[in-house]
Image (cartoon, helix red, strand yellow):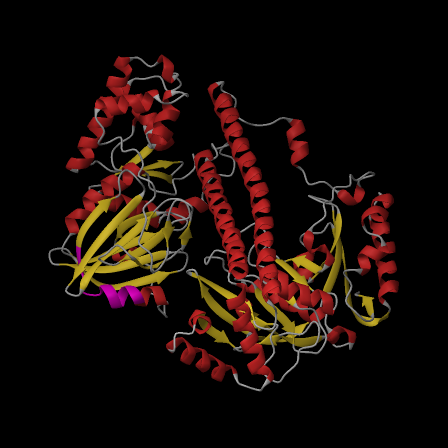
Amino acid sequence: MEAKRELTSVDIAALAGELGAYEGARLEKAYLYDDGFVRLKLRDYDRGRLELLIDTSDTKHVRLAEPEHVPPAPERPPNFAMMLRNRMEGATLSGVEQFEFDRILQLSFERDDGHTTLVAELFGDGNLAVLDGAGEVIDCLQTVRLKSRTVAPGAPYEFPDARFNPLSVDREGFAARLRQSDTDVVRTLATQLNFGGLWAEELCTRAGVEKTLDIEELGDDDVDRLYETVGDLADRLRAGDLDPRVYREDDRRVDVTPVPLEEHAALDADRFDAFTAALDDYFTHFETDADEEPVDSGPDRPDFEAEIEKKQRIIEQQEGAIESFDEQAEAEREKAELLYANYDLVDEVLSTIRGARDEGVGWDAIAERFEQGAEQGIAEAEAVQSVDGSEGTVTLRIDDHDVTLDVFEGVERNADLLYQEAKRVEEKKEGAKAAIENTRAELEEIKERREEWEARDRNGDDGKGGDDEDEEAKDIDWLARASIPIRKSEEWYERFRWFHTSDGFLVIGGRNADGNEEIVKKYLDRGDRFLHAQAHGGPATVLKATGPSESYDDDVEIPQTSLQEAAQFAVSYSSVWKDSKYAGDVYVVDDDQVSKTPESGEYLEKGGFAIRGDRTYFDDIAVGVAVGITCEPETRVIGGPPSAIDPRAETTIAVEPGKFAQGDVAKRCYREFRGRFADESFVRKVASPDLIQEFLPPGTSTISE
């Protein structure tokens, strides 16, 4: 069987009771390791040193560990660990509590200068939030912004919607919850009553109720037995009447439970005096035991519930994005309408600023004049909130709305820009709607696979496919296929230079000054990175943090590999290649450092832009481009840095600076590709010389040996 990776709600209920006995222990130091692993070093008056470990990543659990089971302290504590130390060193553990019947554990600490609560979310992607006495988030490992809840620094902490608690409900509520279901008993206990698969089966076994019995056929006696069985479990957990076990299969640890399970009667078991000790033994040896897992142990049941939960969470995020797009679009339209409703006031402000600039008045002086006018009660001046000379904008307060305007455009043009922004946001909303339908389809497909698996399991099928399935599972040798089906869709970014990094991030770059202009003005969004070769002439390169139908999440992290590949892209399609050089420098900045507004007295040519603030440099980046052909999931030519193209393409050709013209190199690549594929007509359809040439750098090249 597959080894347990996360604590269940029953486990956390038992753990909260045991950890409550350690109230009064004092926190000495906090550590943060990689991947959301937190260590709290405590000192108890009676028990001495305590090591409380909280893992919110791969194995979501909390345990008290023996000192020899604790990893060495990190050399440099990150900011999160320093925050914990500054706020909590010397604080006393004052309470341990499970939130409802959820996989959430709350640890409360008291110090003379305040109250702190650690909330460990041991579900989904996992999280640890640090709350002040008012319940506001001081910091968290993962920022969460969903339609239903937000977990972010500076915001009140919001628990997930409370799950049904079967350990505290009365008999009538228990029965009513069961009767609401339209499936069998075991799945109802697992999902509707929140016990999960294993405990649902255990309760059925203990109560003597057939697991696959349809809820409609469940009698009152069956309900009584189930309710009594759940009540017995609840009483044991509340009383701390535990008898922990670590279960083994083929000498591998596969489960840890606070009480013995009849479902595990056939497994070997190690008994422990405390559940925390059992957890320490299990998770200390988890990685070692996982490495020893037999490769031919038969198919384990996929964790359909986790897949379903993930898809439902994605749908919730997408619904939140759609709602956000609606609000953004409506806000932009409302601002545009306010400009027309207050036309004279807006026009007077814009005209005043333009006139002052024509007379050579500085931006700071203009701002001071408006401040003086506001003190005198002049309505137009009172509306001015700020003037930004670096961007050439003015922000007006109109009917409780702040509207930022381009001072060098008229009222109509500024309103039109706002309407265009509303339209762009609505287009993103349509993309999000399509994405949510795809996710819903994927969710239904997972549910269907779960039904098929369980039907197979009931019929005694071992789940192994026949020869046809084995044949399908093999990799297709597309180069040898006599006929390859054409599958291709048009994407918005194909009019630019583009590629996807090894980590899946989209990178786009302009082919000319018009393309550079469009990318910076229209497609450089919040969270994106802007790159450019430290050489005159090259693409305005944007590494997209999100897709067109996604809202930006502060948790999005762009790996260094993607930045390196984007830098190689920027230098390879610049004048560095055209000058037959093999390396060049590239800088990268955040989206808000790029502007189309020049400094006072300066001029930006078409396709140019101003960079403000510090730049991060990639020094001596080697040029490199590969062109390849993909056969699945789509048939197309792709090109870009070799490290990103080689894994995606069926076959590739690398090029380097050389002496042959772009068109000649494209024709040579085309002939080479035709010789590699058995289906020569396929190459002609998807990889003509013209299509290949689109991915070749400017200037002359040669095919690498």
The answer to whether 3 is drawn above or below residue 518 in the figure is above
Q: Residue at x 38, y 56 (%)?
A: 36
Q: Quadrant of the N terminus?
A: top left
Q: Is residue 409 magenta?
A: no
Closer to the camera in the image, 646 or 579 = 579
Residue 509, x across and y down, in percent: 68, 64
Closer to the camera in the image, 208 or 484 = 484
Residue 86, x across and y down, in percent: 26, 68
Residue 373, x across and y down, in percent: 42, 78
Say whether residue 250 is left or right of residue 279. right
Does residue 505 appear in this view? no
Name of the residue lying farthest toward the bottom: 360
In the image, the segment drawn in magenta is 83-93
Closer to the camera in the image, 149 or 171 = 149
Does residue 272 appear in this view? yes
Q: Is residue 91 magenta?
A: yes
Closer to the camera in the image, 94 or 403 = 403
The answer to whether 68 is drawn above or below residue 198 in the figure is below
| Residue 465, quarter of picture | top right
Say whether residue 337 is left or right of residue 15. right
Residue 199, x across and y down, in percent: 32, 30
The answer to whether 198 is drawn above or below residue 690 in the figure is above
